[in-house]
Amino acid sequence: MSGHSHFATIKHKKGLADEQRSRAFSKLAREITVAAKAGADPTANASLRAVLDKAKGLNMPSDSVERAIKKATGQGNEGQLQEILLEAYGPGSVAILISGITDNKNRTLGEIRLILSKFGGKMVEGGAVQWLFEQKGEIAVSRNNQNKDELELICIEAGAQDLYWEDEDNLSVYTTPSDTEKVRAALSQKGVAAESSGLSWIPKERVLLPAARETTEKLFEALNDQDDVQGIYSNIIL
């Protein structure tokens, strides 16, 4: 089974302390605002529905969610939010894609370059790294003491294209981008609840770099702490 290193929230590494939770809410608010630009009705907007489910899973206050949706049609800086996808190499030539949402691209680029250089990485021109990845739908589910083989079979029957165990209890279910919602609904019907779902960048091949592991983890955590970063994807096995 193919896999990837995905540090969108470092959800499998550490819990959310108050400061981390506040940062997560801020990032989710931006994601909600961007998604809501395609329509404020989650029943007709799968992207918005997915991020709202994520917000619910983190117990994001409902008033914060409502404000974020309203900003999608508002004025000021909120209306200037843009999505970015940056390409970089980390320590040991680890390939990295960094997705983000920002209202000041130049500021964000400068801050991310500084973080990368601190840990032996560098930003590269567009296309230099992205070709090593492919975009897929990703649905995160928890085992909840269920037999691994049984859970994998349920996911395959629901239409999963590929599976990857992040650890002993957390499974990433991969689909084609267009099938993400369909597979998510099929899993729900089979009693498997999704903790989150959305599009992710999955490496075509993975590398094991023990010498770069510790530094890479520190780099990912520093990137995740940057306010505009939404997701971090790499081809290293962590």
Image (tube, rainbow, N blue to C red):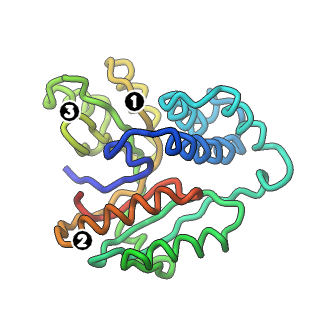
Q: Nearer the viewer, mark 2 or mark 3?
A: 2
Counting other residues with Cα less than 10 Å from the Cα at mark 2, is it few (<14), some (14-19), or many (20 or more)? some
| Foreground pick, 46 / 3 | 3
Give the Cα separation between the discs numbered 3 and 1. Answer: 14 Å
Q: Distance from label 2 to label 3 (Cα)?
A: 31 Å
* Residue at 75%, 44% in the rendered image: 72
Q: Is residue 148 left or right of residue 130?
A: left
Of residues 193 and 25, the one drawn nearer to the viewer in this rendering: 25
Residue at 63 percent across and 30 percent down: it is 42
Residue occupied by mark 1 = 194
Q: x and y percent of residue 33 in the render?
A: 69, 44
The numbered mark at residue 152 is 3
Amino acid type at image mark 2: Ala
Residue located beneath label 2 in the image: 212
- Residue type marked 3: Glu
Query: Of label 3 and label 1, which has the lower sequence position?
Result: 3
Q: Quadrant of residue 25?
A: top right
Amino acid at pointer 1: Ala
Label 3: which secondary element? helix
- Mark 3 or 1: in front is 1
- On screen, residue 235 above or below 231: below
